[in-house]
Image: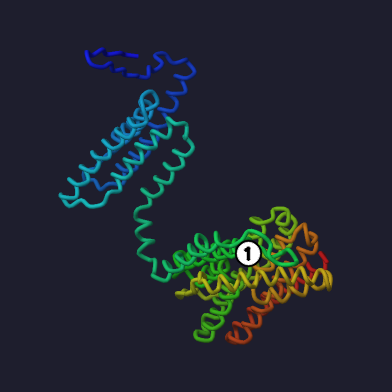
């Protein structure tokens, strides 16, 4: 305490006295954290200096970013022995310096503030490291490196995004951020199986998988050949792929063999998609059903490979798949899922196991996802592991039969012949698996 005596009043200033000597362990830990902060600054500095054109002056590079990280680290250190407001002084002073630099660069025609924002983040990352949030700082640094180093790829990706894609993403955000919190998290039906929030979570889950598959088709499979597009399209909807390719096979019959391979690949990926959904929802069921799904998936890929040998050259055609994210389809899937849950419970109570199998067959005609999620959620409280496995096999089989009917009704002569032969083999294998597990 320092006291200053005046003739009229007495003033007292209280200064916190920092510990003058650190214990060896504390000092060693402090140096470790400083090295981590410097490494973060070095990594960001290397990326910034490497990515700039040689003729362009860089705002900060391999030397400056480590210093910025050290500045943020030191600011946090000083704050720990003074007052939190000191950190605000350091940060605002540095932010003013960055702002001045940006204004000067903008006047010279160099627009864009990526490096300036990166430098502010590095300052704060240095502080986070001192505050023992090293994992958080490292994670943010990794994401920074990704965004900074993928400049060309990100700009190329944005250039390909359509208004439809943005609207679809907005709808996905709506069903996730706005609708989900409004739904009650409790069962609301007499049978105790309809939980609105759980059902909507499954809607978001399936919609997200479909949306990722759609983006893969659009930005990776586009112009890469019909078979690859079919493979990626299976992550969205193998039924939708079959319907679209069947119609195209009539419009361009010379590509019927390519469309055939595309449909078979999409149908094979369906088993992968089913397994992914199960694995994320019920790991125990995933371990028990991996063998039949693997057999069906591998059989589909072998058949696809066999048919691909009939292709003449690398036949390419731009293939468009409709964006799967629409509110009306999300609501429809939610209703189907709820209906499947309710029907399965009623069938179990009043008909027995055979009733559940009948429900799974009918549900598979419209949506494999709904019955798969229902089976994963009903274990072990309502149905046994054996019933769940057989239920999923029945649903995938009925969905495969639907695709065969689509090929017959909408496909060209060669398309329906090859597709039904290939999918017919999958149906036969499914029936054998049904007999084994039943």
The quarter of the picture where residue 257 lies is bottom right
Q: Residue at x 52, y 76 (%)?
A: 312
Seen in the picture, residue 150 relative to 414 is either above or below; the reply is above
The quarter of the picture where residue 243 lies is bottom right
In this orientation, which residue lies closer to the viewer: 87 or 374? 87
Q: Can you see residue 271?
A: yes
Seen in the picture, residue 79 relative to 219 is either above or below; the reply is above
Left or right placement of residue 168 versus residue 206 in this view? left
Seen in the picture, residue 188 relative to 355 is either above or below; the reply is above
User: Outermost residue toward the front?
Assistant: 8
- What is the secondary structure assignment of the residue under circle 1? helix
Left or right placement of residue 198 versus residue 79 in this view? right
The quarter of the picture where residue 291 lies is bottom right
Seen in the picture, residue 399 relative to 301 is either above or below; the reply is below
Q: Residue at x 63, y 72 (%)?
A: 335
Query: Which x, y percent locates residue 212?
Result: 51, 62
Query: Which x, y percent locates residue 130?
Result: 42, 30
In this orientation, which residue lies closer to the viewer: 429 or 138? 138
Left or right placement of residue 55 versus residue 241 in this view? left
* Label 1 packing within 10 angstroms: few (<14), some (14-19), many (20+): some
Q: Residue at x 83, y 66 (%)?
A: 438
Q: How is the image coloured?
A: rainbow
Query: Which x, y percent locates residue 35?
Result: 41, 28
Q: Can you see residue 298?
A: no
> Which residue is the site of mark 1?
196
Query: Considering the image in quadrants, where does the N terminus appear?
Result: top left
Query: Which x, y percent locates residue 425?
Result: 71, 74
């Amino acid at each position: 305490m320092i006291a200053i005596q005046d003739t009229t009043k007495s003033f007292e200033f209280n200064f916190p006295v920092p510990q003058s000597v650190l214990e060896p362990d504390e000092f060693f830990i402090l140096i470790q954290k400083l090295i981590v902060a410097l490494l973060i600054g070095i990594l960001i500095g290397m990326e910034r200096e490497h990515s700039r054109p040689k003729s362009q002056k860089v705002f900060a590079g391999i030397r400056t970013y480590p210093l910025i990280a050290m500045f943020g680290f030191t600011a946090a250190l000083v704050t720990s022995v003074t007052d939190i407001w000191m950190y605000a002084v350091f940060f605002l002073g540095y932010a003013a310096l960055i702002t001045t630099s940006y204004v000067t660069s903008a006047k010279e025609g160099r627009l864009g503030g990526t490096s300036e924002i990166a430098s502010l983040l590095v300052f704060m990352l240095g502080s986070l490291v001192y505050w023992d949030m090293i994992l958080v700082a490292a994670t943010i640094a990794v994401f920074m490196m990704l965004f900074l180093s993928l400049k060309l790829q990100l700009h190329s990706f944005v250039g390909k995004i359509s208004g439809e894609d943005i609207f679809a993403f907005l709808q996905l955000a709506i069903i996730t951020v706005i609708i989900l919190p409004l739904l009650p998290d409790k069962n609301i039906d007499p049978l105790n199986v309809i939980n609105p929030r759980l059902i909507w979570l499954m809607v978001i889950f399936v919609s997200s998988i479909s949306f990722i598959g759609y983006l893969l088709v659009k930005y990776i499979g586009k112009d890469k050949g019909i078979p690859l597009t079919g493979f990626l399209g299976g992550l969205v909807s193998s039924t939708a792929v079959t319907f679209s390719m069947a119609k195209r096979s009539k419009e361009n019959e010379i590509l019927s063999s390519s469309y055939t391979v595309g449909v078979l690949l999409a149908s094979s990926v369906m088993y992968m998609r089913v397994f992914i959904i199960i694995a994320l929802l019920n790991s125990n069921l995933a371990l028990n059903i991996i063998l039949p799904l693997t057999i069906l998936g591998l059989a589909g890929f072998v058949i696809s490979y066999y048919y691909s040998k009939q292709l003449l050259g690398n036949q390419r055609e731009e293939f468009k798949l409709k964006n799967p994210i629409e509110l009306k389809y999300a609501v429809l899937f939610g209703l189907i899922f709820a209906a499947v849950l309710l029907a399965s419970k009623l069938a179990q109570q009043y008909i027995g196991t055979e009733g559940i199998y009948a429900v799974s067959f009918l549900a598979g005609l419209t949506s494999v996802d709904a019955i798969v999620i229902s089976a994963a959620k009903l274990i072990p409280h309502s149905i046994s592991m054996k019933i769940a496995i057989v239920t999923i096999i029945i649903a995938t089989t009925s969905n495969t039969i639907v695709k065969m009917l689509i090929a017959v009704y909408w496909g060209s002569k060669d398309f329906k012949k090859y597709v039904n032969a290939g999918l017919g083999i999958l149906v036969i294998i499914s029936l054998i698996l049904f007999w084994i597990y039943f």
